[in-house]
Amino acid sequence: MKKKFVMFLMAAMMSFSAICSASYGTDLDAEDKIVTQFFSGGDYKKVVNFMDPSLSKEFTADKYKEMFADLDKNLGKMTQKDLRVYQVFEDGHILRYAAKFEKGAVMAVDVVFKGANGKFSMMDFRVVDPNAKAPEEKGAAAKK
């Protein structure tokens, strides 16, 4: 009886650990790799292949280098990113990360993907300080 109980307990623990380490899914895994490659600050020629044509037209190689020069100056390199929100829409996804940088800052990183024919391309992104105060509106300041 004890052996059967121990075997049942072991099987239950193994199945629980298998469920907990399940993948997000092939789409999310592919998108996460794109985000990792994009924010590594590496080769623009590799990154542009994952961008939507509308983004690649306005976000050139020079702007890519400029963005990373600015990020390195103000925040340092990204040391860690943790996926916090995965929003699924009919025609795309939004991934929201909490990203930690070398200089200690924790920023919110949002990346928007557009889906077409089973393939996803990066439409837009932003890096924002989640603790920053929104600028006051003129009407709100006048009411005080």
Image (cartoon, rainbow, N blue to C red):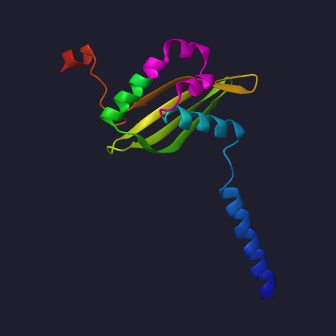
Quadrant where the N terminus sits is bottom right
- Is residue 58 located in the magenta-colored stretch of the structure? yes
Q: Nearer the viewer, residue 102 or 28?
A: 102
* Magenta segment main secondary structure: helix
State the residue at coordinates (54%, 38%). Answer: 36
Q: Nearer the viewer, residue 57 or 108?
A: 57
Q: From the viewer's perspective, is residue 9 above or below residue 1? A: above
State the residue at coordinates (49%, 17%). Answer: 59
Q: Quadrant of residue 31?
A: top right
Counting from the top left corner in percent of width and height, residue 100 is at: 41, 44
Counting from the top left corner in percent of width and height, residue 82 is at: 50, 45
Q: State the extent of the magenta-drawn residues as a range.
A: 41-64
State the residue at coordinates (53%, 25%). Answer: 44
- Residue 31 as seen in the image, left or right of residue 65: right
Q: Quadrant of residue 75?
A: top left
- Is residue 82 located in the magenta-colored stretch of the structure? no
- Residue 57 as seen in the image, left or right of residue 14: left
Counting from the top left corner in percent of width and height, residue 144 is at: 18, 21
